[in-house]
Image: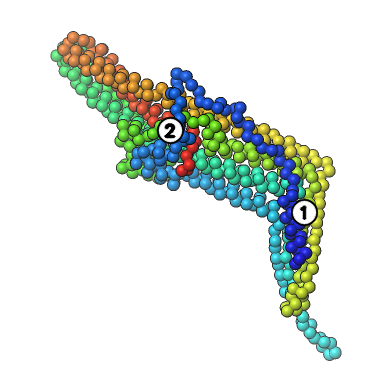
Amino acid sequence: MIRLRTALLMLGASALTACNLAPTYVRSVSQSVPQGWPSGAAYAPAAAGKAGMPWRSLVRDTKLRAVIERALANNQDLAAAVANVASARALYRVQRSAQLPTLSADGSAALSQAVGGGTATSGSGSLFSGNVGISGFELDLFGRQKNLSQAAFETYLGTQSGARSTRFTVVTETASAYLTLAADRDLLTVSQDQVQSSARTVRLNEELHDTGLVNGADVADARTLLAQAQADAAQRTTQVAQDRNALELLVGGPVEDALLPAGLAALDPAIANVPAGLSSTVLLDRPDVVEAEHQLKSANADVGAARAAFFPTISLTSVLGLASTALTGLFSGATWTTTPSASIPILGGTNRGNLDYARAQVDYYLATYRKAAQTAYRDVADGLARRGTIDRQRRAQADLVTAAQTSYRISEARYREGTDSFLTTLVAQRTLYSARQTAITATLTDLVNRVTLYQAIGSDDTL
């Protein structure tokens, strides 16, 4: 037993003193991403702020919060991502076990009895045996197993970041789908209002035509606008139903009517703006960027394993055998056997190809990592550009709606009095209809941009 413990200690010492042939990892995206955010007419002045915010601080509407929480619990994409994390963790444990010896034990018993006739003798005997062994353990002198284990570990961490990125996506897509449903409900209301307004205009023109005050062209123009509003209302009705289907797919089940939005008006103050005064280096912690970095680190470790393949591989199989002919002396005769083996690559063609492949994979994942960081920067910059001008756009659009309402009211009154043509009224009515739709679209753009900017920054400790 002393000799067994000594052998195990020697194996552990060999593993601890193994060489590591993996290249030293150095983060190399500092030159790929600007240190600050862009500035100019499209951007608001930078202000001090913290890195990101929890999604519950972003979303203050209680109904939308309930829908998002349900999506985080039931979304199938997220469930698949979590299962992928569990798979990667299990594979890492398998690879990690290769660094440690595997102990196994077995035992057996044999009974025999011989019976003879005449002068022969008869007798019986028993034999008990047991083995404790270290099976197929490789001395990791050059860090091959260590780097393979590190590669598996980085892959596992990458899948964790991927799952976190999926959670961001579930939150933002659910919120965006909810906002889109609210906007289309508002647009449906506008179309229904236009149908009623156009129907009144048609009736008015028909009455005036019957009395000979207007010609048939005015009646036809009024019916044209009515038909357009009716077609829009039918399209919006379909779109609202499809929006609900899309939301329920994200949530992973039906969403009752009580949780659906009435319109954008209630959601506008309930969706917060994320802070923008933060360093662009915060993007290095964005989940998809972190995932790309772990993939790069995994490829870097694979280079170390490929380099170690050029050196001898030493394996050791050791067995402590125990045998006795009597149960009372079962472990009195212990023996220690060891069968070491070594292999040395001579030509190394396969090893050279594997090393070249591993190095090429490092270059690939390095480019992927840099691209992920650059894409993250662009996502935030685009969101900030939209954020810097959307308030002005919404104010201008609101002014346009007000002006269009006034114009339509005046032109309709002048038409009724016979002092203006119906064409002026028709143009004013169409302008008001379009202005109301565009105002809703601008509000939706603002709210969705707040959500997507939250995702672009990628900082939420609650996920």
Tell me where residue 452 sits by quadrant: top left
Q: SS at mark 2?
A: loop
* Residue 274, horizontal then vertical, whole percent: 43, 33
Classed neighbour count for the residue bearing mark 1: other residues with Cα under 10 Å, few (<14), some (14–19), many (≥20): some
Q: Which residue is mark 1?
A: 315
Three-letter code for the amino acid on which mark 2 is drawn: Val
Image mark count: 2
146 w.r.t. 426: above or below: below
Q: Residue at x 55, y 27 (%)?
A: 35
In the figure, is residue 241 to the left or right of 4?
left
Q: SS at mark 1?
A: strand
In the figure, is residue 323 to the left or right of 224?
right
Q: Residue at x 49, y 26 (%)?
A: 381
The numbered dot on residue 274 is: 2
Q: Residue at x 21, y 15 (%)?
A: 410
In the figure, is residue 143 to the left or right of 292?
right
* Residue 235, horizontal then vertical, whole percent: 34, 29
Query: Which of the two discs, 1 and 2, labels the residue nearer the N terminus?
Result: 2
Q: In this rendered view, identify the residue nearer to me: 105 or 283.
A: 283
The numbered dot on residue 103 is: none
Tell me where residue 298 sits by quadrant: top right
In the rendered image, the residue lying farthest to the front is 48
* Residue 226, horizontal then vertical, whole percent: 27, 22
| Cα gap from disc 1 to disc 2, whole angstroms | 57 Å
Query: Is residue 223 in view from this perspective?
Result: no
